[in-house]
Amino acid sequence: MSWDGRPEDTAAALNPDAAPAWLAPLVDRPDAVRNAYRRRVPAKVLAALSAANSTAAVTGRRRDAAVLVLFSGPRDGARGELPDDADLLVTVRASTLRHHAGQAAFPGGAADPEDHGPVHTALREATEETGIDATRLQPLVTLEKMFIPPSGFHVVPVLAYSPDPGPVGVVDAGETALVARVPVRAFVNPENRIMVYRKENSRQTAGPAFLLNEMLVWGFTGQVISAMLDVAGWVTDWDTDAVYELDEAMQLLDLDGSYGEAQR
């Protein structure tokens, strides 16, 4: 499904001026996130992504999709200075799904026939997956579209902000296993950062990941979060030599843990 020809004016649906100062580096340079993303992706992976994208274009398998990248936190604060209580909305997909089963992700999905653009898709999907009240959210900017094989999605990340998004939770256990507002400090913490690769690939294809108590954030979502930390200036030195195969990394999860002080 495509947004081409739909009536949504994406620019009109966005309000970058609603961003707090601490999010300004991301809002002012949304194109920089994709550039930072590409710097973290190994050359072999970039080549494979490019080839898969070209094949999908020829076969007509590319589909429009959007994800909601929702930051919550105080309205005040210094430019680029991460507040202690800022958080990021993340889900874990149900293990029974066809694509990306059990994987941590931003809420989102494919465009539906009634969707008018990426902002509409991201907000609709986030509401369906997490029960969030979209009227409490302010979409700020869209990041550059990125291609994700094997699903064939062309994904537009929609960066949004809310000082208080209200309650969230799993709406459909068949689609989503977990919904969490994760402290951004948990992603910044170097002790939570590792590199991950798939068993069928080599260590040279490893990408940035985040080992949290209840989820391993890797793949596309891990790459985007890593890129945002770089662009925002929140990143701290971490051990990029801590490389794990995906199954090994999953075994390190503390499934009985929670998103408390230990995560920060």
Image (cartoon, rainbow, N blue to C red):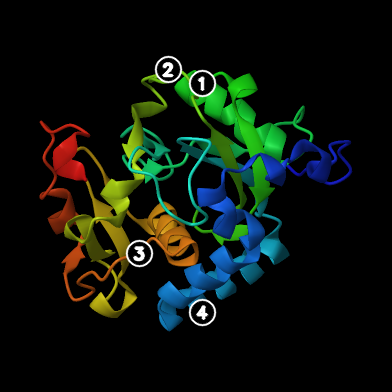
Viewer-proximal residue among 82 and 205: 82
The numbered dot on residue 47 is 4
Q: In front of the other: label 4 or label 3?
A: 3
Please state which amino acid type lies under the numbered disc 3: Val
Q: In front of the other: label 3 or label 1?
A: 3
* Category of crowding for the residue at label 3, using alpha-carbon neighbours closer than 10 angstroms: few (below 14), some (14–19), many (at least 20): some
Viewer-proximal residue among 208 and 26: 26
Q: Where is residue 164 in the image (x, y as percent from the top left)?
A: 49, 24
Q: Earlier in the sequence, mark 4 or mark 3?
A: 4
Quadrant of residue 86 within the rendered picture = top left
Q: In front of the other: label 1 or label 4?
A: 1
Gap in Å between the C-alphas at discs 2 and 1? 7 Å
- Give the residue drawn at x 22%, y 61%: 190
* Category of crowding for the residue at label 2, using alpha-carbon neighbours closer than 10 angstroms: few (below 14), some (14–19), many (at least 20): few
Residue holding disc 3: 235
Please state which amino acid type lies under the numbered disc 2: Pro
Residue holding disc 2: 167
